[in-house]
Amino acid sequence: MSPAPPLILGLETSCDETAAAVVRAEGEAGARVCSNVIATQHELHERYAGVVPEIASRAHLQRITPVIREALLDAGVAYDDLDAIAIGHRPGLIGSLLVGVSAAKALAWSLGKPLIGVDHIQAHLYAGLLDTEPVQFPALGLVVSGGHTSLFRVHHPLEIESLGRTIDDAVGEAYDKAATILQLGYPGGPKLDALARTGDDRAHDFPISMLGKDRLDFSYSGLKTALLYAVCGKPVGRGAESHFQRDASSLSETEKADFAASFQRAAIGAIMKNLHKALDRHDVATLLVGGGVSANSRLREELKTLGEQRGIDVRLPAKEFCLDNAAMIAGLACARFAKREFDDLTLSASPRSAIT
Ligand code: KG4
Ligand code: ZN
């Protein structure tokens, strides 16, 4: 009788979500999610309109053990049933990553199980392979998150080639900044997305970045500045005296919605333009998408249309696998487990991704 497919506990603490999940490997590149627990810290960072690293690390420390226990309980498994412990060890906030890395090492050592460190960005690309049918490789990979906007050629979940990336802001970061300009609150991306659905996306003609016909890179700082000037006017005065002519509080709800919809048209337009370019050059059957912005309603609609137009299999992850989660970490670790690629207890955290 062949042994049962491996059961892996994954941990994720790279930013402001403390997450643990149990998955079971399935086939060559796929995994079934047995539990997926996410404790978000949004309420702790809301008043600062952004993630405060020190607060994030402390909250991870308080939450990690209960979150792991809940993930095991939900999956109906015990520590002894696990075959490996996986951790997203890069990229992210170093203090936050270290909480997860220390917890994963302690578990692996005390249980005598293998430790597997995975790259968070690479894991985002795995989200579309969770709880679903196998895909055909090579694939094109798109990661759109708060810290990354990158395109890849994915030969296999463990073999990834970078094709392009943002040269300034990430698209999620641009959404969050645009939401701040429009005074929509935190976290900005989902709020701007919801408001944009009620606005006229042709009300304003914001720039869609063009970085040369041969490049597959992105740029979002021009779009952000264009929105800032359209909403607040150009800065008046110099140095410490400099100020904007107005702010978003003078806008009606309809005007705000029109700004949001027009921003969203340009932000998503830049992604779609680069995807078309990449598909013209790369003969792939599949598009893997991941990262928080893959929860965006307009992007999801446009990606579905792209799939139909180009005859490719677009893997849009279920919403719970778009944002930071540990199921994608454990899922990617299944591929490492199959190759017996383990880490030892010298595994460390890094603020940078190994693949972008
Ligand atoms: O992948 P993720 O959870 O964390 C990072 O690895 O960065 O992505 C978070 C980002 C944030 O910038 C958030 O505003 C954005 O994803 N986001 C969205 C939506 N949901 C989350 N942006 C646009 N539309 C959404 N519906
Ligand atoms: Zn992420």
Image (cartoon, helix red, strand yellow):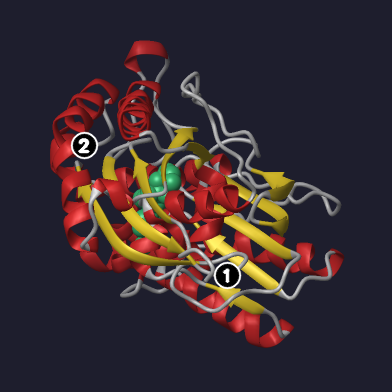
Residue lying at 19% horizontally and 28% vertically, measured from the top left:
61
Q: Is residue 220 left or right of residue 276?
A: left
The residue wearing badge 1 is: 27
Q: Is residue 178 above or below residue 89?
A: below
Query: Dot 1: what SS?
Result: loop
Query: Can you see residue 206?
Result: no
Task: Decide if ligand 2 comes within 8 Å of the CB at mark 2.
Answer: no
The foreground one among 224 and 250 is: 224
Query: Dot 2: what SS?
Result: helix
- Give the spatial CA distance, label 1 vs label 2: 30 Å
Q: Is residue 114 above or below residue 332?
A: above
Crowdedness near tag 2: few (<14), some (14–19) or many (≥20) residues, C-alpha within 10 Å: many
Residue lying at 35% horizontally and 50% vertically, measured from the top left:
82
Q: Earlier in the sequence, mark 1 or mark 2?
A: 1
Residues under numbered marks 1 and 2 in contact, where contact means CB atoms less than 8 Å apart: no
Task: Decide if ligand 2 comes within 8 Å of the CB at mark 1.
Answer: no
Q: Is residue 134 left or right of residue 100?
A: right
Residue 310 bears which disc, if any?
none
